[in-house]
Structures are given as structure tokens and as C-alpha cells.
Image (tube, rainbow, N blue to C red):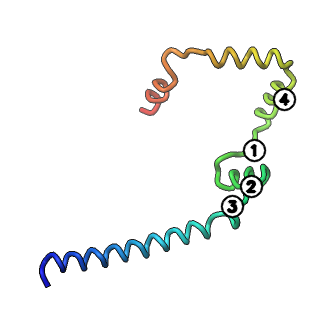
Amino acid sequence: MTTLEHEVVELKARVEHLEALVRQLVGTVRQAGPAALDEPLDLEQLLARCKAEGVVRDPTPEERRLAGEWDALPEEEKASHIRIMQHLVLTPPLSQIITENRH
């Protein structure tokens, strides 16, 4: 067998091994995922899953108080606050503040 033929045989074996490994990993991911991937989660299921994964948490009492204050505001006042925040210009920019605070 020539060197080239030997390399081809070796590469085929490596590809087969990698394909088997990928199939195994995909199977593991599917088993860890929701039972029915085609069915969308309702809001409660989605929230429970996000909490279980640590993506979100329940609000603190202070956050609940502030949310209640926001909910109590008239719609015009809420719209005014939103407009102000949308046109807010930070100096320095927020990205720079974050970068500087990483060090």
C-alpha cells in the first residue's frame, strides 16, 4: 500500500470516529432538552426553565416595590420617561465604562 493510500485509510477511520462522536453528542443534547422540541413552551414553562438554568430569578422585594411604582404611573409619564431614556447620551459611552471597570 502506498503512503497516499495509507493516509486515505487513516483519514477515513478518523472521520468515522468523529462522526460517531458527533452522533453520541447530539444524542446527549437531545436527551437533555425538552421532551417535545416542536411544541413551543408556554410562558410558565419557559419562565420555570429559565429559572432552573439560572437565566432569570424572582424579583427582590425592592424590585417589586419599584415595579409597583412604575405600574402606578400614568401612561403619559411612562412614555415621557421612555423617550428620555431612548435619547440619553452617556459620556463616556457605556461600553467604555464597562471596559474600564473590567480591570
Q: Earlier in the sequence, mark 2 or mark 4?
A: 2
Of circles 3 and 4, the one toward us is: 3
**Could you tell me which residue is drawn at 48 percent across and 17 percent down?**
92
Q: Earlier in the sequence, mark 1 or mark 4?
A: 1
Which residue position holds label 3? Answer: 38
Judging from the image, what secondary structure is the residue with disc 4 in?
Answer: helix
Crowding at label 3, few (<14), some or many (≥20) Cα neighbours within 10 Å?
Answer: few
Q: Is residue 88 left or right of residue 5?
A: right
Name the quadrant of the C terminus. Answer: top left
Gap in angstroms between the C-alphas marked 2 and 4: 28 Å
Q: Amino acid at mark 3?
A: Asp
Q: Is residue 100 left or right of residue 64?
A: left
Name the quadrant of the N terminus. Answer: bottom left
**Could you tell me which residue is drawn at 45 percent across and 33 percent down?**
102
Q: Position of residue 96 (x, y in %)?
A: 46, 24
Q: Amino acid at mark 1?
A: Asp
Which residue position holds label 1? Answer: 58
Which residue position holds label 2? Answer: 41
